[in-house]
Amino acid sequence: MSGRRNRKATALAVAAVVLPAILFFLSLNIGAYRIPPGAVLSTLGDAVFGGAGGPEPSPYFDILFRVRLPRLVLALFAGAALAVSGASLQALFRNPLVFEFSLGISYGAAFGAALSLVFLGRGFPPQAAAFVFAVAAVVAVMAVAGRSASQTVSILLSGVIVSALFQALLSLVEFFANPYALQSLIFWLMGGLGLATWGDLAVTLPLIAVGVTVLILLRWRLNVLSLGDDEARALGVNVGREKVLVIVLATLTTAAATAVTGVISWVGLIVPHLVRMAVGPDNRKVIPLSAAFGASLLLVADDIARSAASFEIPIGILTSVVGIPFFIVLLRRSGRLWL
Amino acid sequence: MKVRVDHLAFSYGAFTLEIAGLSFAEARVTSIVGPNGAGKSTFLKCLASVLPPAPGSVFIDGQDLARLGGKSRARLIGYVPQEPAFTFNYAVLDFVLTGRAAFLPPFSSPAAHDVEAAREALRVVGLAGFEERPYFELSSGERRLVLVARTLAQRSDILLLDEPTTFLDPRHEVEVMELVRRLAGEMNKTVIVTLHALDMAIKYSDALVFMKQGRVVAAGRPDDVLDEGLLRSVYDIEMGILNVAGRRLIVR
């Protein structure tokens, strides 16, 4: 029994490394302008080894380095951020339906980023305000839920209330924005990776890297925290301190991603559940595998967004179309099969 | 390890727990009995620091419990709550492993020797072979044993068990109580249990503590404290004590 479990875990661990790498390479070929795999390799090779091939730079250089690489790197990081943050929050709140979107974090971050973009301009990194308002959203959700915060439904209701508040505030920002800023704001809000520049990534990627790494280090501790406050306290855990740490990290990664991508919801719900269906609830596996498969899912979603139609479909719309039916199924079978 | 309680007080709403003075001896099983609402579970939660006691009210081998950090406390005291509700269906071994939290810094995962401690704990409670079984698929009796195994992985010398036999059939009830005796007798644990079944308490305990309305009414060896007058005053009904083949049985 344990042998079979180990083999399955090993296979998944290998897939977790190989799958995002393969998808990343394939995604470099896909887009409005197809680049054959050979040309991708030679262009990347020229760039790394100094372009010894000839005096003429590859015609694909600009597409690859200015357009495709930043958005694909962002897809990897944002996918990992959203999935790890969702998995951690589910363990911490002992609630399989909680994730950054249902806790109001997504719209808190979106409001903060919009506020920053409209009033402070693009020169100021929107990640700071996104983080501040995302934290405000979680605190508000926990305060509204109050003592019944451990109950599945009451925390979801509080999340709905707080999300609605931040959506209203977001509309207010749109109301005050000038027409030019408004257009880019709305486009960004639908969720998309296409607007990413290396400048945005310079702030977002390190924040996500730190948040995801520390949450992965805390993976076993999340098993202990997921037993409940009293249990964890009796086991010697400083519950208050470690809860705050996990919430701050989960909020930080989500806010850093959302500030650049807009609202991409449901990844934090779908990925951890699929991982639990495959390997069980042990967070030592769930957290790192969520990072890998979250990254893969967002790469695939972005490939579809870029290539399914003659125009680009906002990726946030795609993830919602897939995520909402998934959520309904989960809600119906709260008769915990794979939790 | 010896546990000494000195003027422990705790209140919520209209209920007040007030324990003037009480001691629990090493390598002994002490059962706390009394009617519903007597404060048995609240008392146990105070000892477990789930409801933190005030400084100077509980001492473990002379150390003030309120001044101990979480980790040092967890290494001394293991707590088995009444039917806790869990969300995630961990495998039994992963569940028992959480007992190692007090030995591991937050950013690390259990090592081979932690896994060995958890396996050993499962052997002691008679659940070797259950390592990969999902917790929710176990019977109530087996779940209690898993919870006890976790406190063994925790290596704490003091065990607090809140109604470990409630909802168990007679066989599992006996199994759990036999285990409790062994933990005190063979592993020198200080075991404190709350129980409703008086017969079990009398048979398996070295000492009884009778509680009513948040206070200790009587405490001592079963032979010394037990009489019909005490039972009447604690439970407000008539109960008789029969001596049958050297055992004392309670009849209602």
Image (cartoon, coloured by chain):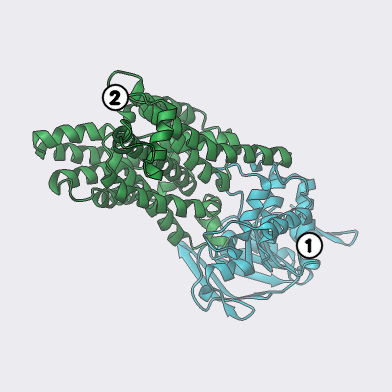
Task: Give the chain letter for green.
Answer: A
The amino acid beneath tag 1 is Arg
| Number of the label disc, if any, that sits on residue A7 | none
Q: Which residue is mark 1?
A: B181
**Front-most of A250 and B162?**
A250
Q: Chain of mark 1?
A: B
Task: Give the chain letter for cyan.
Answer: B
**Front-most of A137 and B110?**
B110
Horizontally, residue B7 falls left or right of residue A97, namely right
Q: Quadrant of residue B46?
A: bottom right
**Front-most of A67 and A96?**
A67
The amino acid beneath tag 2 is Glu
Mark 1 crowdedness (10 Å alpha carbons): few <14, some 14-19, many ≥20: many
**Front-most of A110 and B7?**
A110
| Number of the label disc, if any, that sits on residue A312 | 2
* Quadrant occupied by the N terminus of chain A: top right
| Numbered disc 1: secondary structure | helix
Q: Residue furthest right?
A: B245
Question: Would you say the residues marked 2 and 1 are in contact, meaning their CB atoms lie under 8 Å apart?
Answer: no
* Quadrant occupied by the C terminus of chain A: top right
| Numbered disc 2: secondary structure | loop
Horizontally, residue B181 falls left or right of residue B44, namely right
Q: Quadrant of residue A328?
A: top left
Q: CA distance from mark 2 to mark 1?
A: 70 Å
Locate residue A254, reporting x and y percent: 35, 45
Q: Is residue A298 visible?
A: no
Locate residue B235, reporting x and y percent: 64, 58
Q: Chain of mark 2?
A: A
Q: Is residue A200 visible?
A: yes
Are labels 2 and 1 on one chain?
no
Locate residue A298, reporting x and y percent: 41, 33
